[in-house]
Each structure stands twice: as C-alpha cells, then as structure tokens.
C-alpha cells in the first residue's frame, strides 16, 4: 500500500460491541461512516470529524480499534501518537474499523447473552433497556460536569434536553433566559440540580453547579419522554423530510423508535414533520404575503405573461391564474385550436382546486397553456378562469373545448367563448357510466360496453354508429339509454360540428400528476413555482429532442401517415373531376382535394390525408405531405417550444429575508385562505368533479322514473 495514500476507515458509533463465541469482537446497532486518516492527521482533527458525524459533544467518548491479527483486543486512540500507530499497523488493511464508545463502558456481553442481560439488569441505567445500542445513549455525555462551556444558552438547553432523554428523567426550569439557566428534576424532593450562567460579558454559558444525584424514583419503564418536543423531532427528521417530502408519519414513528428507542404517538410525529417542513420552507403565511410581489415579478421577467391574483373582502387568498408567455405563444403558433379543461382537488392543508387548460402539440403530446388555483370547482370559478384564459389568448381562431360534464363548465364555456364548440371527454363519460352500473354488471361486461361506446364515438358513417348502438343495447338496454341520454353532438364524431382532431379523451391531470405531488403540501406560491420549473424543463427537453428529427412531420404524425399510405395502393380510384375522386374500399368514398375533405371524415378528424385521399393523390402524382395541416410539421413543433420561461423569485430564501416586513408592506396584503379541516386523513387519490350532470334513474322493469327494480312496486305485485 502506498504510504502516502490515506486509510479509508469505517467509523461505527451509536451501537455497542459484543463478543462472539470464539472471543472475537463485533459491533452491533448504531450507524457507520467513512473517514480518511493518514500520518499527517492530528488527533484533534480526527475528533472534530467524529463530532460532525455525531452531531454533538464527544468529550465523553473513547475511540478504539482492533488489531488486524487479534480481533479480541481493543487498542485505544487518545493522542496523535496513537493515531499514527493505528495508520502504520493497518497499512495493508483496506478498511480498518474504529469504534466510538462511551468512556467507562462495562464489560463486553456475549451475543447469546445480550437479551438476557438487558432484561434482567437491575442496576440503575441511563436509559430504557430498549434504548441500549440506540443513538440516544451517546447523549449521556452531553453534560459532563462543572466547568463545561457552551457557546450560548440555546446550545446549553439543547445539551440538557439530550442528557435528560439519555438519562430518562424530566426537569423543569427555575430560571431560563439568555444570561442564566437553572433547572431541577421534576421528581418531588429530588436533589438533582444544574445551573449555568454567562462568562463575563460573552454569550458563553458555563456550568457553575451540577448535582448529578437523583433521590427520586425515576420511571424507567416508559419509552416516551416529556422533553421529546416537536422541535427536537423536527431537528432529527429534517434531512429526511427534505429528501422525501412524502416521508410518512408512520415511518417517522418507526424510525425514531428504531434509532433512539423512543415511542411517539401519531400526533407527535405529525407535529414534528410540520415543524420540520416549516423550518425548511418557511412559514406558510410568508408565502401568501409574497404572492402580489411574485405576480409582479413574473410579468416583469416574462413579458406577455398573465398572473391574476384575487382576494376576498377579508384580504384572504381567493384564487390565482397563471399563464406564461411561452405557453401562450406556443399554443397560438404551434398547437391545434383545441383546449382541454380539467380540474383536480389539491391535497394541501389549505385545500383548493387546481384548474388546468392544455392543448396538444404536433406530436400529440400534452401542452400546458394555463392553470389556476381556486377554492372549489363550481360555475363561478370556471367562469372566472375562462375569462382570464380568453384575455390571455389573442388568437382569432375558433377553439374547440374538451372537458368532463361538470355543470359549471357546460354553462361557462358558451358564455365566455361564443360560437366555440364544446365536446365531452369520452373517458369521463364512460367512467360515469361504469359508476352508475357498478352493481349490475361485471367488470368484463363494463369493459365491453366502454369499447362499444368508443366505437360509436369514432364511427364516421350513420350505419356504423347505429350498429355500435345496437351492440350496446344487446348487452345492456340501460347503458344504451344512458349514453343516448347524453347529446351525441357532444361525444360522437359523426354529429360533432367542431374539429377535435380525433382527440376523444383527455389525461391532462394524469400528465401533471407528478408535478402536483412534488408540491402537494406546499402553499400556493410553492405550487406555482414547481409548475413553472416543470414546464421550463418540459420545454427544454422537448426542443432538444426535436433537433434529432430529420422528417418533415413529427414522429407520431409520420407513423399515422405511413399507415394510411401503406393501405392506399390497394384501393380503386375513379376520377370525377380535376379535384373530385371516388375511392372504393368497403364503401364508395368521395374525396375533394380542393376542400381537403373525404366522406369517411378521417381526413377532417386527423388533420392528415386518409388512405382514400392518398390514393387519389397518387393518381395525379401529388405528395400527401403537401396536404397535411401545418400543426403536424416538425418546424411547427420546434416553434411551439421556441420561447423560454425565465426564473421569477428565489422563493427558498423568503423565510430568511431580513427585510421581509419592508418588502411585504409595499404590496397588497394577502392572508391565509379560510379553510375548514375535514375529519380524518386527507385523501390522496384524485376526486372526481362533484357536480356531474346526473341522469334520471329509470326502473329496468316498469321503465318508470325515480326508482329501480328493487324498490319497484309494480314489479313486486307481478312477482307475488
């Protein structure tokens, strides 16, 4: 081994040593860290690294290692000379082990006797039997005695808390301020007492009095502790909460018990997580107060964007609409005149609903246009959202909207966007049907009905539509009556007047679900910023990927067109005029090249020439690519994502801004939204719209309204 190369040592702390049957030593419990040690490393530097790992005072700890050839003997490291000798001895050892133990540790316990010793020990112990080998045992040396120094009163109080947890007793303060801290045991008549005060004019606290003798009966059976506060829990779990915002409260309870031997109830762990979240992100009220400033900066840094904030009469947050200029420009220059509207209930403690308007790009991928956070899904909020959307879009194109059947949407869309067409999402439609037929049919039958309804919706001829409808009726007359109870001009291609480009269903919320989950418990400002970052990354990634394309159409459009081109040579074509052709497959199809129409409707639905149109074009030697709508070209796709979204604010520094009051005072005040927390655990699954238009219940026997066959009196009379 190179003498200049440092040793990579494994440092074990928080557990204990046990002896195996052959007398060799092994370490159990605690945690392991890696550290580099060489001959130039001083003992003080080595201890400082261990202190950083331990996260506290290490004055009461000892450092030991085993000889490579003798695992039964421990050698102590107490100075620079010992540390250098350890490096020399382990030159050929790839990863020597160093054990961090409490000074004065008792004799080692054989592995097969460990449990017996823990259960039968009757000597006074520093913590519960279940806490042996836990991290909290290292806190026994947080307080060492008179003369110990702390940088301030806060550090002294924290050391006292750890000491009390490790020693398993409670205390109360007699005096507690920045200059002096005096505490005594909570036990009645107990003599345990500690007092610390400032050293001269400094902030340093020095222990002046320490009577470390308990004359009370401490309850060592309980694993809870009065000084395990939400702030202590927050400090312990903060790093995990930062790495995983979805860190479950039940996992917090389990991890605290596993690491420290302390039992928490659910509410303690929940409050600890909320405190950790607040320490990491800042106070929720600060984020709401920053909303006016954020909206202003958003428009300044992204000219042409829309950010509209509305508050209640009590100055509480009401609703917020956001649409970035890059999204507006991308929709107007590169997307089809098609907008999906969807909403989902947010899981944050302040509730609310997220509204999203999206389109599809040239490659049939979801393209976000605008979003808003409102109180609930109703007519008033949808009407407000659509008004903001209309003000954001300067296009004169007639738009087609696709959404679920929420009553508020059905009323608001024609009021705000006159002469625009409004279609129903077939996915929501069939889901509503399956819910109402939940008990009557099996899953297999329901799936067949859904497939038949999609077939009817895509039918391009009247006979095809009615054939599908008859098939539905043969499986379930109730389902046929239900689907025809919904206006076919809202869901069937054959009767829909607008151009929905064969987009029968929307999955907007599912597409952005991962974005929402990253900010599920955050205030509105954090949610908006997460959405901005995700949209920015989406634009960057898609634009970068499109530079690799070498076709005039996008990959998905090319695939669709080639499927039609492969079938075109098999068709028979007759010429009616210079621009009108008759193409025969199973039916006679009329193709009008001048009007870009085919009687099969597929050219209109897809925006790309159908097989009949391609067959006609082949007859006159023209390319099908010249008859594709521009919305499917690669150039149009790149234009869609050509704009960038600039950063707005460094919101991670909001809670630490020193002049927060000055900043907030210069903007309108925004208070937390008024919410009523529901009983039980918040839902994590997406909730459906609450105001879906419901059909009148019809009895399957007598066909009467308002009841079913179970409660049908006429049917009961006939059966008796």
Image (tube, rainbow, N blue to C red):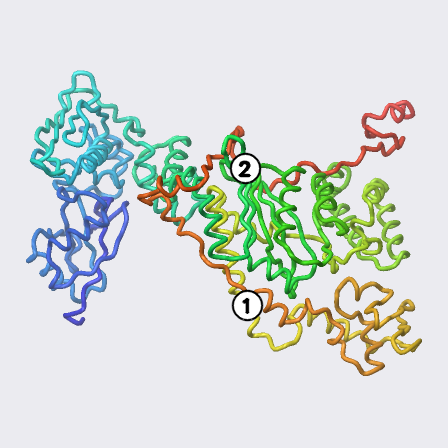
**x then y, percent, for residue 197:** 11, 31
Image vertical order of residue 286 relative to residue 716, above or below: below
Residue 262 at x, y = what percent? 32, 34
Q: Is residue 129 left or right of residue 286?
A: left
Observer-nearest of 684 and 190: 684
Residue 573 shown left or right of residue 218 in the figure: right
The mark lying in front, picked from 1 and 2, is: 2
For the residues bearing labels 1 and 2, Cβ distance under 8 angstroms:
no
Crowding near pointer 2: few (<14 within 10 Å), some, many (20+)?
many
Name which quarter of the figure residue 345 lies in: top right
Front residue (pair 10, 492): 492
Residue nearest the viewer, comparing 529 with 663: 663
Does residue 541 appear left or right of residue 14 in this picture? right
Label 2: which residue?
318
Relative to 465, does residue 714 appear above or below in the rendering?
A: above
Label 1, on which residue? 543
- On screen, residue 241 versus residue 90, left or right, reads right
Tell me the CA gap for discs 1 and 2: 36 Å
Where residue 140 sits in the image (x, y, percent)? Answer: 18, 36
- Residue 548 location, x and y as percent? 56, 74
Report the residue at 47% width, 59% height from top.
646
Q: Secondary structure at mark 1?
A: helix
Mark 1 and mark 2 lie on one chain; the one further toward the N terminus is 2
Quadrant for the N terminus in the image: bottom left
């Amino acid at each position: 081994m190179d003498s200049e190369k440092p040793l990579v040592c494994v440092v074990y702390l928080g557990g204990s040593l046990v002896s195996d049957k052959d007398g060799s030593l092994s370490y159990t419990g605690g945690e392991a860290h890696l550290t580099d040690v060489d001959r130039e490393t001083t003992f003080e530097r080595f201890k400082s690294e261990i202190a950083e790992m331990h996260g506290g005072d290490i004055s009461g700890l000892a450092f030991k290692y085993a000889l490579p050839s003798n695992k039964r003997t421990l050698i102590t490291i107490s100075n620079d000379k010992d540390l250098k000798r350890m490096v020399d001895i382990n030159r050929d050892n790839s990863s020597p082990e160093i054990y961090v133990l409490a000074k004065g540790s008792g004799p080692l316990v054989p592995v097969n006797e460990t449990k017996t010793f823990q259960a039968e020990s009757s000597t006074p112990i520093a913590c519960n039997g279940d806490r042996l080998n836990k991290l909290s045992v290292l806190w026994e040396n947080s307080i060492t005695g008179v003369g110990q120094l702390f940088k301030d009163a806060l550090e002294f109080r924290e050391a006292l808390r750890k000491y009390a947890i490790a020693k398993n007793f409670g205390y109360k303060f007699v005096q507690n301020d920045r200059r002096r801290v005096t505490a005594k045991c909570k036990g009645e008549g107990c003599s345990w007492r500690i007092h610390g005060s400032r050293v001269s004019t400094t902030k340093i606290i020095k222990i002046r009095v320490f009577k470390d003798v308990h004359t009370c009966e401490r309850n060592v059976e309980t694993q809870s502790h009065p000084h395990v506060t939400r702030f202590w829990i927050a400090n312990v779990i903060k790093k995990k909460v930062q790495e995983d915002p979805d860190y479950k409260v039940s996992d917090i309870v389990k991890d605290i018990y596993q690491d420290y031997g302390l039992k928490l109830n659910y509410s303690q762990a929940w409050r600890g997580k909320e405190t950790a979240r607040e320490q990491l992100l800042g106070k929720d009220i600060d984020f709401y107060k920053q909303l006016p400033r954020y909206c202003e900066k958003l428009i300044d840094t992204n000219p042409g964007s829309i950010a509209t904030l509305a508050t209640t009469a009590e100055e509480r947050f009401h609703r917020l609409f956001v649409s970035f200029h890059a999204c507006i420009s991308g929709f107007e220059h590169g997307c089809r005149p098609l907008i999906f509207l969807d909403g989902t209930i947010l899981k944050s403690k302040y509730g609310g609903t997220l509204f999203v308007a999206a389109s599809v790009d040239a490659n049939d991928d979801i393209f976000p246009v605008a979003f808003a956070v409102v109180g609930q899904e109703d007519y008033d909020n949808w009407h407000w959202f659509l008004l903001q959307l209309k003000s954001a879009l300067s296009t004169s194109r007639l738009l087609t909207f696709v959404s679920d059947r929420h009553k508020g949407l059905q009323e608001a869309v024609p009021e705000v966007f006159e002469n625009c067409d409004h279609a129903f999402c077939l996915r929501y439609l069939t889901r509503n049907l399956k819910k109402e037929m939940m008990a009557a049919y099996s899953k297999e039958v329901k799936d067949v009905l859904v497939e038949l309804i999609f077939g009817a919706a895509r039918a391009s001829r009247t006979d095809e539509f009615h054939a599908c409808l008859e098939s539905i009726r043969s499986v379930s007359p109730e389902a046929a009556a239900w689907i025809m109870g919904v206006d076919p001009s809202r869901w069937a291609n054959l009767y829909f007047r607008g151009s929905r480009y064969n987009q029968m269903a929307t999955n907007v919320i599912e597409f952005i679900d991962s974005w929402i989950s990253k900010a599920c418990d955050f205030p509105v400002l954090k949610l908006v910023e997460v959405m901005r970052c995700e949209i920015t990354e989406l634009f960057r990634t898609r634009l970068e990927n499109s530079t690799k394309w070498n076709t005039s159409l996008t990959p998905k459009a090319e695939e669709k067109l080639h499927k039609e081109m492969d079938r075109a040579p098999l068709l028979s074509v007759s010429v009616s005029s210079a621009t009108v052709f008759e193409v025969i497959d199973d039916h006679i199809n009329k193709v009008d090249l001048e009007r870009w129409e085919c009687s099969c409707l597929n050219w209109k639905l897809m925006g790309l020439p159908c097989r009949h149109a391609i067959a006609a074009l082949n007859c006159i030697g023209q390319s099908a690519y010249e008859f594709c709508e521009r919305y499917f070209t690669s150039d149009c796709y790149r234009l869609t994502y050509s704009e960038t979204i600039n950063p707005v604010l460094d919101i991670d520094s909001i809670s630490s801004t020193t002049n927060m009051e000055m900043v907030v005072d210069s903007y309108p005040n925004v208070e937390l939204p008024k919410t009523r927390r529901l009983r039980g655990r918040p839902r994590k699954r997406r909730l459906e719209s609450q105001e879906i238009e419901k059909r009148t219940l019809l009895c399957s026997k007598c066909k009467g309204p308002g009841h079913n066959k179970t409660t049908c009196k006429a049917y009961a009379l006939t059966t008796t």
